[in-house]
Amino acid sequence: MTTDCCFKTTAKYAFTQSLPILSGFLFLGMAYGVYMHSLGFSPWYPIIMAVLIFAGSVEFIVAGLLIMAFNPSSVFLLVAMISARQIFYAISMLDKFRGITGWKRWYLIAGMVDESFAINYTADTDKTGVDKAWFMVLVMLFLHIYWVTGSALGAVMGVVLPFDLKGAEFAMTALFLVIFLEQWGGEVTHESSLLGIGMTALALVVFGKTNFLIPAMLGILVYLTVRRSALHDKLTNKVAK
């Protein structure tokens, strides 16, 4: 049972740890809300999606998919590939989640994002007066609130402010282009990035823009599976040099 004093100390520590993420989540959430409005959705859509999905990159993608013919298998595979890194986050957090039960455990599992993982994994929860379980839950909750608030502000701005939103849908393309360039700059070898570009282009030519997604992802998966050992050796050798 957490005392009021302990809870206040824990909440204060969780808030200070999450505060550096506030501005980033607010601005990105606002961009997402405006983007959803530019696609023709009412303000409630980005707010509800921010509450239930809570995965920035996935939400941008889902927004675009909602205006296309619905293909459940494509959506599932695309989201699974984007969020696959969460598997490794979860494995790393097994020890920290041990002993946490009930709704707290489920919220920590379902709501984990890059930022909450980074904070909860590295924070010193052995400080006097800090409850570990509540700290991790509150960090998650604060980040969730930041994201929902940003999305709500963006959704309202899109309706209220009189500016031309034509071309705002390019925000998602720009976002992933920046992410790709950052990843490219930090890679030891560019084989996987070039594979993604090449396989996607090939699938687009062969299957067309409506059906290229699943073949492209399956092709990437098969290639990486076959080349796993060789890629591992290449990465190891380059890092060693």
Image (cartoon, rainbow, N blue to C red):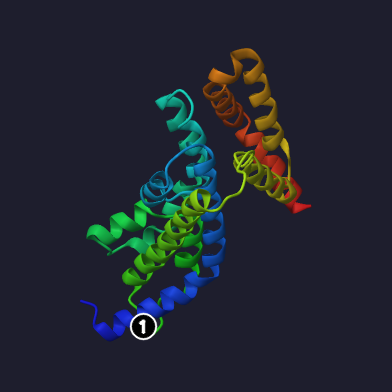
Image coordinates of residue 227 in percent, x first then y, are: 63, 31
Q: Residue at x 57, y 30 (%)?
A: 225
Q: Is residue 183 left or right of residue 116?
A: right
Q: What residue appears at the point 43 percent right and 32 percent down from the top-left corner? A: 76
Please name whichever residue, 24 or 157, is drawn nearer the observer in this view of the structure. Answer: 157
Q: Is residue 51 visible?
A: yes
Residue tagged by mark 1?
9
| Furthest-left residue in this view | 1
How many numbered marks are there? 1
Quarter residue 207 falls in: top right
Q: Amino acid at mark 1?
A: Thr
Q: Residues within 10 Å of mark 1 (few under 14, many from 20)?
A: some
Q: What residue sits 51% from the left and 63% below the top?
A: 118
Q: Position of residue 32 (x, y in %)?
A: 52, 48
Q: Is residue 83 visible?
A: no
Query: Could you say whether the residue bearing mark 1 is in a helix, strand or loop?
Result: helix
Q: Going by the picture, which residue comes out furthest to the right?
A: 241
Please name the residue shown 47% across and 65% down the image: 121
Looking at the image, which is closer to me, 112 or 224? 112
Nearest the viewer among 155 and 200 is: 155
Rendered location of residue 68, percent (x, y): 48, 26
Instruction: Name above or below for residue 25 compared with residue 65.
Output: below
- Left or right: residue 182 compared with residue 102: right
The residue at the far front in this view is 162
**Residue 199 sits above or below residue 19 on the image:** above
Q: Position of residue 151 (x, y in %)?
A: 47, 54
Q: Is residue 77 left or right of residue 108?
A: right
- Report the quarter where the N terminus lies: bottom left
